[in-house]
Amino acid sequence: RQDILSLNHGMTVMRRAMTIEVKKEDKRKTFLKEDYLRLDEHYREKRIQVHVMREYAEVALKEMAEALRLVLDYFTDSKQAFIKRHFNGREDVLKLATSEESWKSIIESLSTTQKLIVADDDDMNRLVLAGPGSGKTRVIVHRIAYLLRVRRVPATSIVALTFNRHAANEIRKRLLALVGADAYGVSVLTYHSMAMRLTGTRFERGATVDERALKQVLSDAVELLEGKRNVEGEDDLREQLLRGYRYILVDEYQDIDDLQYRLVSALAGRHAEEDGRLCIMAVGDDDQNIYAWRDTNNRYIERFREDYEASTSFLVDNYRSSLRIIEAANQLIGQNSARLKEANPIRIDRARQELPAGGLWEEHDEKRQGRVLRLRIDPSDRERGNLQAQAAMAELGRLLALEQGSWNGCAVLARTHRYLWPIQAWCEQQDIPYFMAADKETALPITRQRSFVAAIDYLREIEGALCAADAWQRLSGSNQMVEAEWTSFFQTAFEQMRGELGDCQLGNGALIDWLYDYARELRQQPKEGLYLGTVHSAKGLEFRHVVLLDGGWSAQVDTLADERRLYYVGMTRAEQTLTLCEFADGNPFSRSLIRDVQQHEFQGRPLPELEVRFQQLTLKEIDIGFAGRQSPHARIHKAVEALREGDPLTLKEEAGRYQLLDRQGNVVGRTAKSFQPQIGFDQCEVAAVLVRFAEDGEEQYRDLNKCERWEVVVPRGRGK
């Protein structure tokens, strides 16, 4: 489905012409509740009939004679007698606009508080204050499922807003598993995707999309909805753009900035007449607002109840962490003032209340017994982090040996990237699989990586329309899917496409455009192994074992509350064990944890091999047009084509730049003039190979290109 022409979001029903006569005396009549009683009675009876037919079908599958008896009873018994005979103890099922099995899958697995939120039939605006690990995504998914299956709300009338593609994917994946094809048509979008849809913006496939461009799209969408742009018929513009939407669900509301706040307000119709407003449910936690540098502010979540006349619900049962981790997290965040959940701290969920406080590790680990560990390190190591890396990895190694587990599901988190460098060196030295969450500078565009472009080339050659499932089947059966990580990437992408578009037939252009939009919203493609990243990068994730590093944490009074929230987010990523590294002169947060924690002094000497650093060049540090300015028949193109990630390279200085040579001595690229080595490059290898098109460059430089398309080698060096 490409929506080339859409009438009223597809909700317009074509019928034969009919004439409706409105009597003059009824023109000003106001309909009262009693006017709908007969209609309500009619639909109640219809629901009973549907359940009876379902009961007949299920009984017939087991015993046809019993099914025929049910039919006879239906036509001979009174309604009350029939229900008592065939639905005794299940009378409530007959009131549902869904099957008993569907009701159970949506409602029965929820906690009491979750049920009240999900099964709200009064369409109240609601603020859900949800602590870490409390199942907020579950509540959003089950609320949407309830609207779809029980309330029979059209999928096209529901929109869920998330902060990133990962969260949107998770909601869509769970919703599809819960309600199947009923999920098709629900809009699960990031803020930027919503803004692009509203404004009709589409970035060119080769375009570089930065934060400024995305912010402009958001601004355009807000001005459009607020009526601040001169558009013909602007009085009805919001209604036209949002026609069909009735429910809006917003995730991570505490993290919105001013533009996003205005977008949500305009979408929900906060300033509109009552019949023009959407029913809004926002889920957030002021304790997890960690984006102060992005001008986010807790004032928006604090104002929500007033803005939308909303009721408040608290989700504080934690399904993720052990009791010891929960109690330590509460000790920390309780030191912040003016919190919305101050009287409602997170607690372990009811099903685990009888378990030992340390969970599985109470008996599994005689040394720690599941306690939070304060791992103290000599303060002389603060600048280098060498001893800290040894201490962190030794403890993780000990835990993995006890459980005979893998590095997947483990994380080392830090305030800043520099404290992760010795950990990275350890992983390289010990051949430990790891994934380093990139910052904005080193992240490479997925849409330009060789394997992505090869897959796009393959899809472009397909003739005719395909649904998402068929497209994935064709691609996965081709020779493009060699690397396991790219197989995983595209499998997930096509699953998300199917969740969003169902089995609609798409031309290859629409398939490719969707994949480009999907890939742009992912900063990088995650890999298997130990997760290394900043606390910011790990927001929304969870891990069996977490080590939180010291270094870079501020104790300044004006930012102390912000820093404490960030540390709290890091702590609450942990499911089973939490290790807090601290330099012995005192981490401002771990040292405040004094109840039921274990302390250990790490003794060791710095290891020279952990002083090795790795530098991946950014695109600004590479002459990305170097190969493109050479003949299509030049040797460089064949040499680059033969390269694979991890292949060795040599840097050769020449005229203020560095040439990149492969093992045969062929020139495969060169650095930009601006490149300055931060380390001595003892070794160098291929980090990635990107594809560059002539049209990607600025117009005034395109005449210099002799190729329409070429490959660019991105090097990564190691040294001290």
Image (cartoon, grey):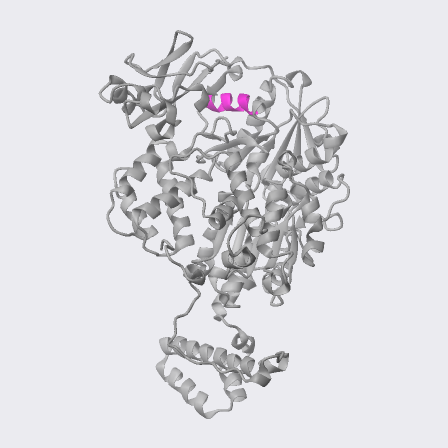
Of all residues shown, which one is farthest toward the bottom?
76
State whether residue 335 is above or below residue 606: below
Q: Is residue 354 visible?
A: no
Residue 151, position as x, y percentages in the image:
53, 68
State whether residue 685 is above or below residue 299: above
State whether residue 479 is above or below residue 699: below
Q: Is residue 338 visible?
A: yes
State whether residue 121 is above or below residue 432: below
**Residue at image location 33% in from the left, 28% down from the top:** 694
Residue 446 highlighted magenta (yes or no): no
Horizontally, residue 181 falls left or right of residue 335, namely left
Residue 162, position as x, y percentages in the image:
54, 47
**Residue at image location 46% in from the left, 27% down from the top:** 432
**Residue at image location 63% in from the left, 39% down from the top:** 569
Residue 115, position as x, y percentages in the image:
61, 62
Which portion, as a residue range, is magenta? 420-428
